[in-house]
Image (cartoon, rainbow, N blue to C red):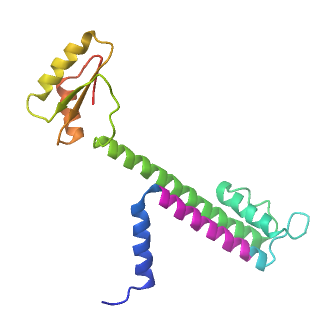
Amino acid sequence: MKKPTIGQRFKYWFDGVMARGTGALLGVLALATAVVIAIDALVIIRLKLNVGPDGERLPAIRVIWDNVVQTLGANDVAATSGWPFRISMIVIAFVGVLVVANLIGIVSGAFDAKVAELRKGRSTVLESGHTVILGWNSKMTTIVQGLCEANASAKRGVVVILAERDKVEMEDEIRSRIPKPGRTSII
């Protein structure tokens, strides 16, 4: 077997991180952002572009702070002094746009995954005084409709169905045959 290349190793590592979930993705995004901010700050300091509005050199911590603020907020680049410094800040602003876009994508993906998990019926049921039905058959909607009618006089009724069937299919069938369950929640 051939020794894997650096690119293959990176792809393998990245796939492993992606599989770990949202927290790991946010960590990688934060690390990548910190690395880019540090590299840009180092370039600014090495090329002596860290000149403030009064003509004095800015300390390294101020350059790093300005890079963080520029990354997260995309402040006014035109107000800075000197074109090399402006170009450096534009690079950081571009990185900031990518960071925010990725952050939105990660958070959106996490919400989508959670909704998909909930739609599959893989959540804990914390009900009490409820009716549990085990399994699913062709008479299920008739049974559930009868329970809804029986719970009509109750303050709140709950029917929980546990079956080896797709949750969305069960919900769709129940909604089509029992459009108004009254005060009964069907889980």
Q: Position of residue 184 (x, y in %)?
A: 28, 20
**Is residue 17 in the magenta section?**
no
150 or 110: nearer the eye?
Answer: 150
Point out the residue furthest to the left here: 138
Residue farthest top in this picture: 153
Q: Locate residue 115, reporting x and y percent.
A: 37, 43
Point out residue 160 in the picture as x, y percentages from the top left corner: 24, 30
Specify whether 114 is left or right of 103: left
Tell me the magenta residue range.
23-43
Q: Main secondary structure of the magenta part?
A: helix
Which quadrant of the view contains residue 67? Answer: bottom right
Position of 171 relative to 56 (above/below): above
- Decide if residue 30 is on the left or right side of residue 166: right
Q: Residue at x 39, y 74 (%)?
A: 12
Q: Position of residue 153 (x, y in %)?
A: 27, 9
Q: Which of the image's four quarters has the C terminus?
A: top left
